[in-house]
Image (tube, rainbow, N blue to C red):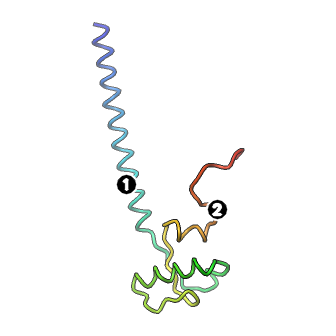
């Protein structure tokens, strides 16, 4: 009788763990979709002042892909996304994925 109860409890815990895992997978996919969908078009030169030329070149290429044929690294417009090569120059190492700073 006791073994049967333990087996039932174990089965219930497994079902709950599976349900939680499915919910987490759905959440992860929603976050991934939202991340891939994010785009920020910048048209003011002052807003990109100080960014490396390579970042501006990539952002101008992205803008061209999205229909802004006249986009140039020097004059814009610039399209930024949440893909690593796009956001890293903007946020720097503080936004880079990786281990947390020790003692933080």
| Cβ atoms under marks 2 and 1 closer than 8 Å | no
Q: Nearer the viewer, mark 2 or mark 1?
A: 2
Residue 56: image location, x then y, percent: 57, 81
Mark number, residue 6: none
| Left or right of 16, for residue 92 | right
Q: How much space separates mark 2 and mark 1, taking CA atoms?
A: 25 Å
Pointer 2 local density, CA inside 10 Å: few below 14, some 14–19, many at least 20: few
Residue, disc 1: 29
Would you call the spot at circle 1 few (<14 residues within 10 Å), some (14-19), or many (20 or more)? Answer: few
> 57 and 12: which one is in front?
57
57 is higher (above) or lower (below) than 94: below
Camera-side residue: 93 or 80? 93
Relative to 14, 35 lies left or right? right
N-term-proximal mark, 2 vs 1: 1
What residue is at 40 percent from the left and 68 percent from the top? 37
Residue 33: quarter of image:
bottom left
Where residue 93 appears, as percent x and y from the top left, is 64, 62
Residue drawn 40% across the image and 51% down it? 28
Q: Which residue is mark 2?
A: 93
Residue found at the far front of this picture? 54
Q: Quadrant of the N terminus?
A: top left
Residue 63, compared with residue 39, is above or below; it is below
Left or right: residue 64 compared with residue 101: left
Residue placed most toward the observer, 84 or 76: 84
**Furthest residue toward bottom:** 70
């Amino acid at each position: 009788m006791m073994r049967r109860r333990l087996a039932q409890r174990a089965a219930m815990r497994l079902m709950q763990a599976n349900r939680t895992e499915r919910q987490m997978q759905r959440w992860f996919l929603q976050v991934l979709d939202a991340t891939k969908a994010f785009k920020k078009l910048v048209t003011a030169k002052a807003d990109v002042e100080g960014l490396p030329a390579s970042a501006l070149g990539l952002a101008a290429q992205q803008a061209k892909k999205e229909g802004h044929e006249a986009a140039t690294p020097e004059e814009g417009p610039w399209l930024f996304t949440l893909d690593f090569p796009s956001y890293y120059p903007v946020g720097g190492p503080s936004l880079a994925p990786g281990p947390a700073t020790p003692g933080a």
